Amino acid sequence: MGWVRRKNNIHIEALDTETFEEVMEFVGENKDTYRKKWSKFKYGKKGAQFSWNWAAFIFGIFWFAYRKMNVYAYLFLGVITIIDVLFLITTKQTSTNNSSFFGVFLIIALLGNQSYLEFVVKKVNKLKEQYPNKDERLKLIKKRGGISWINVLIFVLAMVVYAFTISIVEENVYQNYAAQKFEEAIQLEEKGKVKEAITIYEKLKSKDHPIPEISFNLALLYYSEGDMDKAEEEINNFLEYEPDDEEARQIKQEILSR
């Protein structure tokens, strides 16, 4: 993405007057803010240069779409997809760790200004090659630069489609996996291997895709093992989803009476 380079980074002061003016024209809204931030970069420095961007931190990958950096936005979406798919394959669930997203937003906030400078300069230089006529070029710069709420809306829709699709895939994968492991746990119960069955049930428990029967079976197993606290906890978990189940209510009374 051009965030970490071995060669010298692009610097605003190294641009010729015409390119500088067109870069500012391409930025459009808040161009003075970006000019000040870019001017603070160290001239001739190699590698990443950090500069805080609140909009990039708050909106994360949506900021890319807002600034018409669509390649960046959809590249990040692709990375998220790969991470979720790999997590799904290994754990049968998608990742719900929000701290990882905080880390991504933090990186975007710190490196967003540099990536945006490189993006804008690259776009302007390409237009200079393609359109030698300055007036014609400036019209295209104003059209292709600046911000775009339409891009944001399209990207939001893409994220919604992705979230909906991955949730369906996740549920199907988890349900198929859970059905196999559930049957395995029942077979262990029948063989008297209670602790092994409990281990499987505990691993199967999922906040995103709860299966009440797991809590019901766990309550019975913990009851048989004499662990009344866990038995009560699991039967209560089951009753949250099946509050009118008479058998579960009776089991709870038996647990409480012990």
Image (tube, rainbow, N blue to C red):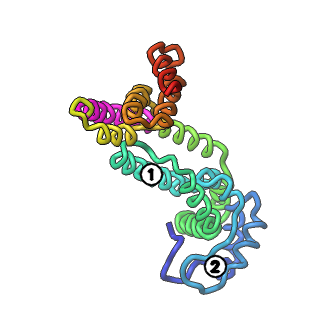
Determine if the magenta segment contains residue 126: no
Write down the quadrant of residue 28 in the picture: bottom right
Q: Horizontal placement of 172 versus 256: left or right?
A: left
**Residue 132 seen from this side:** no
Q: Furthest-front residue in view?
A: 258
Q: Distance between the residues labelled 2 and 1?
A: 30 Å
Q: Residue 105 carries which label?
A: none
Tag 1: amino acid = Gly
Q: What element carries label 2?
A: loop
Dot 1, how many residues are within 10 Å of its Cα: few (below 14), some (14-19), or many (20+)? few
Q: Mark 2 points at which residue?
A: 11
Residue shown at 65%/67% (left/top)?
113
Residue 27 in sight here: yes
Residue 250: x, y in percent? 48, 17
- Per the image, the residue denoted by label 1 is 78
Q: Which of 179 and 203 is in front in this view?
A: 203
Q: Write the start and end of the magenta stretch as one range.
A: 165-188
Q: Nearer the viewer, residue 44 or 231?
A: 231
Say if 36 sits above or below 91 in the image: below
Q: Is residue 122 left or right of residue 52?
A: left
Tag 2: residue type?
His
Residue drawn at the location 33% of the way across and 34% of the way down: 178
